[in-house]
Amino acid sequence: MDFTGAASRESLALAIRGLDDVIDSADPDDLARLADELFATVALLDGQPALRRALADPAADPDRRAELLERLLDDKVGASTLRLLGPLVRSRWSRPRDLADAAELLGRRAALGVAERTGTLDEVEDQLFRFGRILDAESRLRQELEDRSGAAERRVELLDRLIGGKVDPTTLRLLHQSVRSPRGRTLDRSVGELVELAAARRQRYVAEVTAAAPLTEQQERRLSDTLARVYGRQVSVQVSVDPQLLGGLVVRVNDEVIDGSVLTRLTEVRHRLAG
């Protein structure tokens, strides 16, 4: 997806922050429902260009745009989906298609949020990657899954015969969407985007730990359990050693740094004594 306009990039960043707050606290079943409803909204926007333009019209009152969407979806999606879509429609978009693209990206991220909450994100990323390699090796299969001369459900049925019951439900949900609604992309490109997105989501909860000496397996497990309680989900711990720290740990998760090193404490003491 290519969000080249500044307005679209800013609106998307705001929407992603809102969704991440939901992912951090939502039940996996609720997240799966949210993803499905977002994908259904994308289909609605793709199928009705006039509606898409009306909802993304920068000249229209933002609240009126949100009211229009709510009237259309009120009995079709849940309250949490409407809460997420309201700010999305109120935002400014550089072009109408960006609104639908953003809704699809949020749906994909919500689906991957299910895997985050259930601890299967690594497995989902690997399954998506391996499916991409299958597409590379089986050109006829790729053509059948991309064949738009027939009904979309026929492509979905073929996909189910291939991998139904063999992959994580999140993997199947994401591939269903890619096969059912290619939105102008080749399937291998769509799968490649999903692999990149899954990898990015996985890195979101990787703790980069710097220690003065190697940690034992028990220490790593205890640290991982402690961070999981703090962040409300599993956290993968990656440890590097820096003897200059003298002791303690420095932990970085995304942009948050927890510095408990002896070196830092000594430096702070020196500064207080010097001050």
Image (cartoon, rainbow, N blue to C red):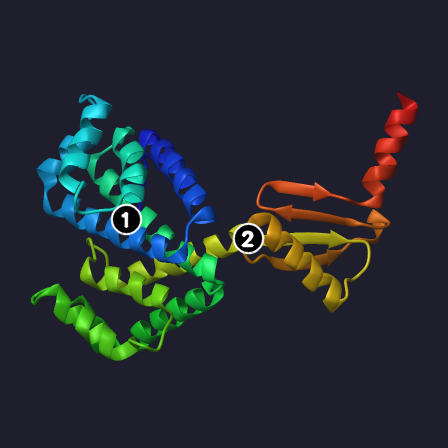
- Please identify the quarter of the rendering in which residue 91 is found: top left
Q: Quadrant of the C terminus?
A: top right
The residue lying at 14 percent from left, 67 percent from top is 153
Three-letter amino acid code at the position of disc 1? Glu
Three-letter amino acid code at the position of disc 2? Tyr
Instruction: State the residue position of label 1.
Output: 104
Left or right of 270 on screen, residue 119: left
Name the residue nearer the viewer: 134 or 71. 71
Q: Earlier in the sequence, mark 1 or mark 2?
A: 1
Q: Is residue 80 above or below residue 185?
A: above
Q: At which x and y percent is residue 130?
A: 39, 72
In the rendered structure, are the residues bearing label 1 and label 2 in contact, judged by CB atoms less than 8 Å apart?
no
The residue lying at 9 percent from left, 36 percent from top is 50
The residue lying at 87 percent from left, 26 percent from top is 272
Q: At which x and y percent is residue 89?
A: 25, 33
Name the residue nearer the viewer: 230 or 11. 230
- As helix, strand or loop, the secondary structure at mark 2 comes to loop
Q: How many discs mark residues in the rendered view?
A: 2
- Alpha carbon separation for disc pair 1 and 2: 23 Å
Instruction: State the residue position of label 2.
Output: 205
- Please identify the quarter of the rendering in which residue 239 is found: bottom right
Q: At which x and y percent is residue 41?
A: 20, 47
